[in-house]
Image (spheres, grey):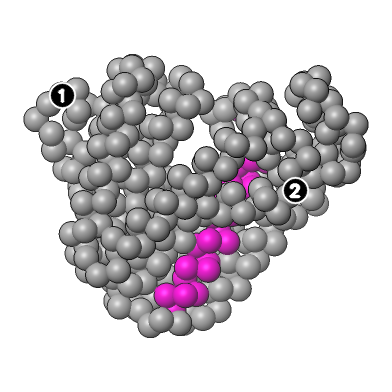
Amino acid sequence: MNQPSWLVDDLLRVETILLDTAGGSPHALVRDPALHLIQAGGKRLRPALVLTASRAATPGAVATDLSAAAVELIHLATLYHDDVVDETKTRRGVDTVHARWGTEVAVLVGDYLFAQGCLLGARAGGDVPGILAGALADVCEGQIVETAALHTADRPTEDYIDTVSKKTAALFGAACEMGAVTGGASDELRAALFRYGMHLGIAFQIVDDLLDFVGDPRVTGKIPGTDLAQGVYTLPVLIACERDASLAQDLTASHADLDRVLVAMRDTGALEATQAAAERMAAEALGALEALPPGEPRVTLETIVGGVLAQTPEWLTA
C-alpha cells in the first residue's frame, strides 16, 4: 500500500532501532546473521500496526518505537526458527540464515533476536513486556499444536482457526495493543485495536495458506503446495476433506499429490470457501475499527485489511 508520510517517517525511526539492536554485537558471527533478514527488506507490517494504532491516541512516544522494533525482532526470530524446522533455503530473495551459517547459528541467533526483542519491550515498560510475553507464548503454543496435527486430514476447521489465532494472529493483536497502550489510548480503544489485530492476523494467515495453492510463485516466493508436502493441512485442504471423504482417506494414507488435492479443492468449492472465510475475518477486523474516531489512522488500518485481501486472485472473489 502507499504509506502516509507520517508512517514512512515513523518506520524509519524504527528501522534505525532494528539495525542498532540486531547489529550491536562486536562478534561478526552474531552480528551478520542477526542483520541478515532485516537488511533483506520486508513489509514491516507488525511495526506499522504498532505505530498506526498509537495514533488512535497520542503518537510519537519512545515506548511506541521500542515496541514496534520489539515485535519485529520477535517476528524475525520466529522466521529463523521456522526456516530451520522447514529446511527452507531462501527467504525474501536471499539465502536463509541456516543455509548460509548453519543450523546451530540460525537457532542461536533466533534466540538472540527473541531476547533483544524482549529487552526492547522491557525498555518500553508499562504493560508492554506482559503483552509481548503473552503473545510469544501463544506463538509457540500454536506452532507446537500445528506440529502435533501434521498429516491429520480430519482435523476440524475450528481447530485450524484456533491454531492460527495463536501462531500468527497473536503478534498482530499484540502489535495493535502495544500501540494503543504506549499511545495512552482508553481501555475501550485498546480492546478494539486488539480485536482488529487478531482478526486481521487470522485473515492474513488464511490468505497466505490460500496463496500456497493459487499464488504466483514469482510473487509469493514459495513452491506451490509446500505446506501440503510437509503434512500441514491448511484451511482449503481441510474444507475439501470435509466435503470429499475420499480426499481425506487418500491424505491419511499418503496417497494424494498436489494435482489430486487441487482438483478436489476446485470441485468442492474449497478455494472459494476459504476466500470467504478470509473475507469474514477481514469484516470482523473492520468492524472493530468502528470504535476509532474518523481520521487517517483509521483509514490506514482499513487499507491494510484491503491489502491483505487483494493478494488473492480476482476469480476467487467474483
Residue shown at 55%/59% (left/top)? 200
Q: Is residue 266 left or right of residue 317?
A: right
Q: How far apart are marks 1 and 2 (CA)?
A: 46 Å
Q: State the residue at coordinates (22%, 65%).
A: 125
- Residue depicted at 36% across the width and 20% down the height: 103
The answer to which of marks 1 and 2 sits earlier in the sequence is 1
Question: Which residue carries the number 2 mark?
Answer: 156
Residue 264 in view, yes or no: yes
Magenta highlight range: 189-217
* Amino acid at dot 2: Pro
| Residue 207 part of the magenta segment | yes
Count up the numbered dots. 2
Dot in front, 1 or 2? 2
Above or below, 182 against 316 in this view is below
Counting from the top left corner in percent of width and height, residue 1 is at 48, 52
Residue marked by disc 1: 28
Residue 48 in the figure: left or right of residue 249: left
